[in-house]
Image (spheres, rainbow, N blue to C red):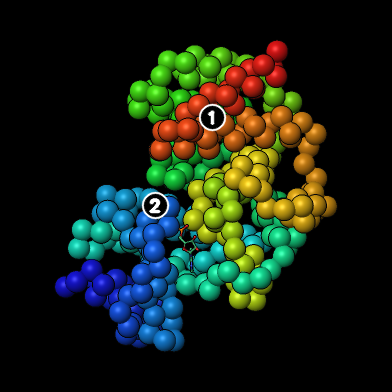
Amino acid sequence: MSAWQQITDHIRDASGEPFQPESPRSLGGGCINTAVRLSDGNRHWFVKLNQASRLDMFEAEFLGLQELAAAEAIRVPLPLCTGTADGQSYIVMEFIPLGGSGSNASAGEQLAALHRHQAEAFGWQRDNTIGSTHQPNDWTADWVDFWRKHRLGFQLEEAARKGLGSHIQRLGENLLERFSVLMDHDPAPSLLHGDLWGGNLSHDDQGNPVIYDPATYYGDREAEIAMTELFGGFGAAFYDAYNSSWPLDSGYATRKTFYNLYHILNHANMFGGGYVGQAQRMMERLLADLG
Ligand code: ADP
């Protein structure tokens, strides 16, 4: 049986509805996976495919989307099923027509509402991935400990494994020792999308904001807002609305660079090139700011 026949059968079983799709329509690649629309003209599904070994990544995405959806704060595609077929892993979720015109003010307000959903500790029920890199989420009571071990520390270990150079390691060790002074605020474990750059936010055809492709965990909401600023920003209306709903703590501007270092280090680990120098410069600047 072909992969598409197996996926179609799975969709039929999981949705409990008849489904006879037309040929799959390729939507071009996302950053990591191959994306396809499966439709019978009545029901439309968004399917992402990767190697069979990446099933775990799709299972984490499935649970992340479920958790974000349960908060009922901002629209996310509802996941239907995951599996493997013919040497490929897949996730199937609701297809949402994206690219509608909508206001980023609504996105800011709804993201603040999402962040009001909190856990008892930092982390999540399971590990997931950030880009294509493993992201550990062991529940941790203290945010500084969590960030030291499971975010900055983990990416530095990854950099060492990839042989990214001793200079990064030295800067990193220095930062790991000293960054706790930056954390002179008391963050709550907020439900985060976790990978919220411009490519993972859009609007549906009704103008409602939609976020997708998450790396969900419970953490300092500042880490999420910092990432929205990393690759271009979401515009003043977004930040005004977010801050009207729930103002950020003072000191965010300094912590922002620190939080974004995680993503730049991850890019250095995934792609190398200019991201390595960028990560080094960020670390040098942070260490200089720390005095
Ligand atoms: P990747 O995991 O490879 O980065 P994404 O999940 O970001 O892939 O999806 C790739 C693109 O497909 C997105 O940028 C978005 O435009 C579109 N997309 C994502 N989710 C959906 C969905 N549920 N319905 C319709 N289009 C989607």
Which one is closest to the eye, mark 1 or mark 2? 1
* Labelled disc at residue 228: none
Most foreground residue, 217 or 111 = 111
Residue sitting farthest toward the right: 244
Instruction: Classify residue 131 by image quadrant.
Output: top left
Q: Quadrant of the N terminus?
A: bottom left
For label 2, the residue is 32
| Label 2 near ligand 1 (CB < 8 Å) | yes
**Which residue is rendered at x = 61% and y = 34% of the image?**
259
Residue 110: tell me if it is visible. no
Left or right placement of residue 29 versus residue 283 in this view:
left
Left or right placement of residue 11 versus residue 77 in this view:
left
Counting from the top left corner in percent of width and height, residue 128 is at 44, 45
Most foreground residue, 37 or 71 = 37
Most foreground residue, 217 or 232 = 232
For label 1, the residue is 278
Left or right placement of residue 282 versus residue 5 in this view:
right
Crowdedness near tag 2: few (<14), some (14–19) or many (≥20) residues, C-alpha within 10 Å: few
Residue sitting farthest toward the left: 1
Q: Quadrant of the C terminus?
A: top right
From what the image shows, is residue 192 above or below residue 261? below
Q: Amino acid at mark 1?
A: Gln
**Which residue is rendered at x = 55% and y = 70% of the image?**
98
Counting from the top left corner in percent of width and height, residue 41 is at 42, 86
Q: Amino acid at mark 2?
A: Ile
Instruction: Classify residue 285 by image quadrant.
Output: top right
Counting from the top left corner in percent of width and height, residue 218 is at 59, 44
Q: Secondary structure at mark 2?
A: loop
Q: Secondary structure at mark 1?
A: helix
Residue 184: tell me if it is visible. yes
Most foreground residue, 149 or 251 = 251
Which mark sits nearer the N-terminus, 1 or 2? 2
